[in-house]
Amino acid sequence: MRRLLLSVVLLMALATQAGAEPCPPGEGVTVVVDATVLDAGVTIACAPGPVDTGLHALDAAGFKVEGTSRFATFVCRIDGQPSQEQDPCVDTPSASAFWGYWHAERGGSWQSTDLGAASHQPIPGGVEGWVFGSDDEPSATVPADPTITTGPENTVLTLTTNDTSTTTAMATSPAPVSSVTVADEPGDVDGPWPTILTVVGVGLVGAILLVLRRGRDDV
């Protein structure tokens, strides 16, 4: 059991280092922000609990969102991307430099939406995707639920995030014990002496009983 817990902890640590933190299966809304063209990579976070709009999901997942000066609900900047120098976010960005908005079911395919983030209602337990720069869908694979397969010897846990799949085999049966050494308690007598003393004691008791019996017979 200790090995199993350690393997799960290590697997979670690897996922965190990769920037992948999807919601637990069936909970919240997972948010994927793809700023690859801005050299900011892909970030995956979880918006816990129910969320009613795409903007709410971004905020609940911990992303800082800025609209334009003219349209406050038009997503122009996410976590400081693009920079102020790249886009002052005064008006609607050009068709080649904006945040595209996508959604998907967990482990499914990206789907575009005709509604803006202020109107679209995320799928409970689903995934929201944002990609900067064009109409292309996010480069990251939609995060899938962890899959667990069991066998007589081990359990295999597979976690897929960010176009990578990590598989860890974890032992569920105890390892064979080749030998067991039990230390003597303080005061224990080592060697054959306990056996010898026992035999001698039994012999003495038998001899005494025999003498007593003969004594009674002589009376």
Image (tube, grey):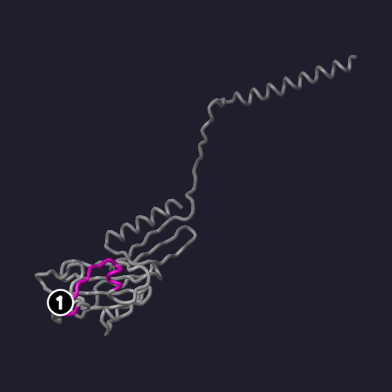
14 vs 24, nearest the viewer = 24
Residue at disc 1, secondary structure? loop
Tell me the magenta residue range: 56-71
* Most distant residue in the right direction: 219
Which residue is more in the foreground, 102 or 119?
119
Going by the numbered disc 1, the residue's amino acid type is Ser
The residue where tag 1 is placed is: 69
Residue 102: name its quadrant: bottom left
Residue, far bottom? 114
Q: Residue at x 46, y 53 (%)?
A: 1
Q: Residue at x 90, y 14 (%)?
A: 219
Q: Nearer the viewer, residue 144 or 170?
A: 144
Q: Magenta stretch containing residue 64, yes or no?
A: yes
The image shows residue 218 at horizontal and vertical percentages of: 89, 14
Q: Where is residue 93 drawn, in percent x and y?
A: 14, 79
Q: Quadrant of residue 188?
A: top right
User: In screen coordinates, is 154 left or right of 83?
Assistant: right
In the rendered picture of this protein, how many numbered marks are placed on residues? 1
Q: Residue visible at 63% across and 26% down?
A: 195
- Name the spot of residue 37 as percent of width and height, x first: 16, 71
Q: Is residue 162 magenta?
A: no
102 sits left or right of 48 in the view? left
Residue 163 lies in quadrant:
bottom left
Asked if residue 163 is positioned above or below residue 98 in the image, the reply reads above
Q: Position of residue 99 (x, y in %)?
A: 20, 76
